[in-house]
């Protein structure tokens, strides 16, 4: 299957990593990206689009062999369903299965009916006794989750009862209902599982750094850095995760009329007994987890993603490198608050075999590289040890000049 043509949907660091991995795949001849960024423009053809029907039209016109969906929103809007009507395979699930990310309540119900370990919860609406529910989960911080796609702003974890109560009331007002969850203590890890009807492949587990400042302080962000493999994901945890979470979820997701084809992001909380619980499911690669997972896949990425889009995973071999990968995100001034776009970026190092400079919020105007978003770039290094990967990633990011930009200096600290 030499020379496949692929359309990657999205324009962040995740999609640049996907394009870089596809560009290194012998099976791939042509890469398109919609909308892409300044980084993808160097290895793919970027295409603007306004909605899902534009994407379908684009995939058809370009006559691509398959589509790879980066973000969740187009999947929830039916990207894979509409592509299927045109006989274009999609790496990414149909809308009914993308609800695992689109609705936290739906995800809870699927977990409950398949005995997948997760925090217990109440669903609250305008007729609920909110105080009684808060009493039920008192003693730990309260975890309140909106039941909508909220772009990372739908969860509040707080020990302040008044804050929990007002977030519950606001969410019921805007969404009709809200989830109140038991607090799970432990260490978090992200486990990405590529699956289709024929089987599944677990990626090396990683750890993300969601808070803006060192020491996990400050506001929540989309992710300020990540590393893999995460030592908290021991062989024991891995066995339990596969047995209790991956196997039952794969069974549940592959038995419908249309099976799950794509990557399931399993957000794990691992407690002191080494028991894994699901904190969340996403129906896409994590960002920045993707940037450190893709470089650890030793096999042909195009072949892997295409296999999953066509229920052919069981027939291919997937190998991983035994190296370590670490990425540090360079964020614009004031991120995760509102940022000014269009600032000049200079001294960006080139990607090499074992160091990837991932563009996220970047664009080129009149030959000048400019910032174009909150998370601007991330520097990823691959090395024999996590410490070396960290040294290399920081040596890269220190070279980049962008006024007001900031990054966390402690990525990987928990493992180092
Ligand atoms: P989510 O969007 O569901 O992943 O939640 C965002 C973050 O909130 C997670 O990455 C955790 O750090 C935290 N969180 C969510 N649910 C829980 C829980 N039940 N117990 C403790 N922390 C949680
Ligand atoms: N880095 C977390 C996420 O992509 O959801």
Image (cartoon, rainbow, N blue to C red):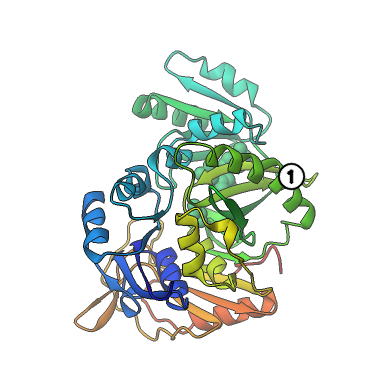
Residue 141 in view here: yes
Q: Quadrant of ligand 1?
A: top right
Give the residue pinned by disc 1.
271
- Coordinates of residue 203 in the picture (x, y in percent): 61, 60
- Residue at image location 56% in from the left, 82% down from the top: 354
Secondary structure under the numbered disc 1 in the rendered image: loop
Question: Toward the viewer: 175 or 68?
Answer: 68
- Coordinates of residue 328 in the picture (x, y in percent): 52, 70
184 vs 344, left or right, is right
Question: Toward the viewer: 375 or 288?
Answer: 288
- Coordinates of residue 22 in the picture (x, y in percent): 44, 72
Q: Quadrant of residue 56?
A: bottom left
- Tell me: residue 191, above or below residue 7: above
162 vs 411, left or right, is left
- Residue at image location 41% in from the left, 30% down from the top: 171
Q: Quadrant of the C terminus?
A: bottom right
């Amino acid at each position: 299957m030499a020379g496949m043509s692929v359309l990657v949907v999205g324009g962040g660091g995740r999609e640049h990593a996907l394009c870089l991995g596809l560009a290194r795949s012998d099976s791939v001849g042509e890469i398109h990206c919609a909308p892409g960024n300044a980084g993808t423009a160097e290895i793919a053809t970027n295409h603007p689009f306004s909605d899902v029907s534009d994407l379908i039209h684009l995939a058809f016109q370009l006559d691509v062999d398959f589509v790879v969906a980066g973000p969740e929103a187009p999947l929830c809007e039916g990207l894979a369903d509409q592509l299927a009507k045109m006989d274009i395979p999609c790496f990414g699930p149909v809308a009914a299965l993308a609800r695992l990310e689109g609705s936290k309540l739906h995800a809870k119900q699927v977990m409950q009916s398949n005995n997948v370990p997760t925090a217990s919860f109440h669903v609250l609406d305008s007729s609920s006794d909110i105080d009684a529910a808060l009493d039920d989960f008192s003693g730990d911080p309260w975890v309140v989750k909106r039941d909508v796609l909220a772009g990372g702003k739908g969860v509040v974890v707080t020990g302040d009862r008044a804050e929990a109560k007002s977030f519950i009331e606001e969410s019921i007002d805007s969404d009709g209902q809200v989830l109140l969850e038991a607090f799970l203590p432990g260490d978090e890890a992200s486990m990405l599982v590529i699956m289709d009807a024929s089987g599944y492949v677990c990626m090396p587990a990683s750890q993300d750094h969601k808070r803006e400042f060192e020491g996990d302080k400050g506001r929540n962000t989309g992710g300020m850095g990540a590393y893999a493999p995460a030592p908290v994901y021991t062989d024991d945890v891995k066995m339990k995760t596969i047995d209790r979470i991956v196997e039952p979820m794969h069974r549940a997701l592959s038995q419908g009329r249309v099976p799950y084809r794509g990557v399931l992001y399993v957000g794990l909380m691992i407690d002191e007994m080494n028991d894994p619980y699901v904190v969340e499911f996403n129906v896409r690669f994590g960002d920045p987890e993707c940037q450190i997972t893709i470089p650890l896949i030793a096999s042909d990425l195009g072949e892997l993603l295409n296999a999953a889009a066509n229920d052919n995973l069981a027939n291919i071999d997937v190998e991983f490198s035994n190296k370590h990968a670490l990425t540090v995100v360079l964020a614009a001034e004031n991120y995760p608050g509102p940022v000014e776009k269009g600032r000049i970026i200079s001294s960006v190092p080139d990607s090499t075999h074992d160091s990837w400079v991932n563009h996220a919020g970047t664009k080129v105007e009149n030959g000048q590289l400019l910032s174009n978003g909150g998370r601007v770039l991330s520097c990823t290094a691959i090395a024999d040890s996590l410490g070396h990967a960290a040294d290399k990633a920081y040596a890269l990011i220190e070279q980049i000049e962008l006024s007001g930009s900031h990054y966390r200096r402690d990525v990987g600290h928990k493992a180092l």
